[in-house]
Amino acid sequence: MSKKLIKSGLVVSVMTLASRVLGLVRDIVIAHLLGAGTAADVFFFANRIPNFLRRLFAEGAFNQAFVPVMTEYQRKHGDDEVRELFSRVAGTLGMLVGVVTIIGMIASPVVSMIFGTGWFLDYLRGGPEAEKFVLASDILRVTFPYLLFITLTAMSGAILNTRGKFAVPALTPIFLNLALIAAALWLAPHMENPEFGLAIGMVSGGVLQFVFQLPFLKRQGLLVLPKWGWNHPGVARIRKLMIPALFGVSVSQVNLLFDTFLASFLATGSISYLYYSDRLLQFPLGLFGIAIATVILPALSRRHVDQSSKQFDQTMDWGVRMVLTLGLPATVGLVVLSEPLLRVLFMHGEFSAHEVHMAARSLHVYSIGLVGFMMVKVLAPGYYARQDTKTPVRFGIIAMIANMVFNAILVYPLSYVGLALATALSGILNAGMLFWGLYRKDVYCPGRATAWFVLRLVFAAAVMGGALEYFSPPLEQWVHWSSWHSMMELSKLIGIGVVSYLLATLICGIRPVILKAMDEG
């Protein structure tokens, strides 16, 4: 079991790495084109709304509800019933999201007014931010169709994951990145408002991702004609699980939207600073946290169906240990190297040293919540695999309210940095509640061995942080170095961080075999 999980996790991680690296290239090209001014703020705003809805309809609540039900159908029912369920799910979800997409396109000014209230108020007063509201409404009308195609893509990827075909869904985002890079290089520069070119690239990428997965669905015998199936028994169960899960799995996205709402009242560039720092945070989160969560949800679902509570606990423990093993050093690296990373990746074209410094401030505090964000991705499947969506909902609502309270307290003294800190704190709170809920119900009960393992990891991460601080040049020097010199220096520091962390873990007695054997008991 553990070998299969590790192999699947490595496959997803490698494919996700390729996608995330290309995603960084995409963000570098966008930063060079737009910088962190009005155009960037507006594009990232119009990007965030359909992506938020995507996580509601597809990658978030839907995925967590769909995978356990589909896994049960595959183990207990015949192929015809599995195909019928997928057909009904595809038709029902596609119809609902299609209607939402049309409404969103028509009502884009209303959506912009709700989430960009600061810009709308300036529009009413004829203030300096009025242009942002008009642009946001127009661009949102272009980007909204992305929601339909990416939802169908996520649904297709979810069923491929239940069949153990993890590589294809993990590789799919590459096509979005390629489309945006192409738009940024060859379309947007020739347009009066380059952000419109990027919006077209975004929708094109959504289409490409969906089309890419169709041959693989056909190979699995699942390229079926979508049918409406609201009352189909399987769809009804998914619907029942999905509706409450909309709250539980979308807390971080609601928090980001609330951040966007508050940032519309702040200085120009605030949304962009949060976006660029969040993109760097998403790199390890997607590479490690989401990859691990992707492979353990089907495994946990099988353990629940088989009523194997011991192996369920062991699989959870494997996921938690893997997250901490990879998440702690990633957190330390982002905190210590935040400004050098942004300097090397984004300081080109319209993105100046000032933007680097401003984005580094929010990345610093976002990083505090990285392990919490990753733990949420791994702990939440412990509930969804057991078809318990109500408990995460309660925790999610508490975390969301806490985030709003933190935002209200921190936004004015700390500006956009306060928004990042509030998001990090609410993520940690959510992870803590999810863990406590599983522990209290005896679903996941880590023992002394796990506690001792965590303490050794913390020590190793501290050693890594000390080594990076010791060898890091003063920040003032980075601004004066050439791009090549900065890249070489950053590569050296990353190497020092990796080596020091590995040596520290070995000195502490942590061996790869520990991770490999943990769900063998």
Image (cartoon, grey):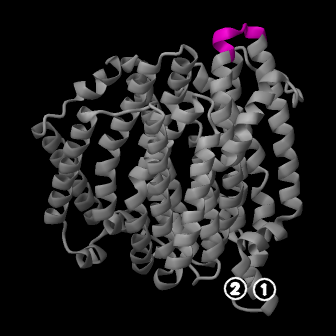
Decide: few, some or many residues near mark 1? Use Cα within 10 Å; few <14, some 14-19, many ≥20.
some
Residue linked to disc 2: 129
Where residue 479 appears, as percent x and y from the top left, is 30, 76
Decide: few, some or many residues near mark 2? Use Cα within 10 Å; few <14, some 14-19, many ≥20.
many
In the displayed structure image, the side of residue 69 where residue 375 appears, left or right: left
Whether pointer 2 and pointer 1 mark residues with C-beta atoms closer than 8 Å, the reply is yes
- The span shown in magenta is 73-80
Q: Residue at x 52, y 59 (%)?
A: 27
The N terminus: image quadrant: top left
In the displayed structure image, the side of residue 262 where residue 5 appears, left or right: left
Q: Is residue 78 magenta?
A: yes
Q: Is residue 183 above or below residue 5?
A: below
Q: Is residue 389 magenta?
A: no
In the displayed structure image, the side of residue 476 where residue 144 appears, left or right: right
Q: Is residue 5 above or below residue 271?
A: above
Q: Is residue 124 above or below residue 44?
A: below
Question: Could you say which quadrant of the image residue 154 lies in?
Answer: top right
Residue linked to disc 1: 123
- 3D distance between C-alphas at marks 2 and 1: 7 Å
Question: Could you say which quadrant of the image residue 267 lies in?
Answer: bottom right
In the displayed structure image, the side of residue 88 where residue 385 appears, left or right: left
Inspect this view and state whether residue 18 appears. Answer: no
- The amino acid sitting under disc 2 is Glu
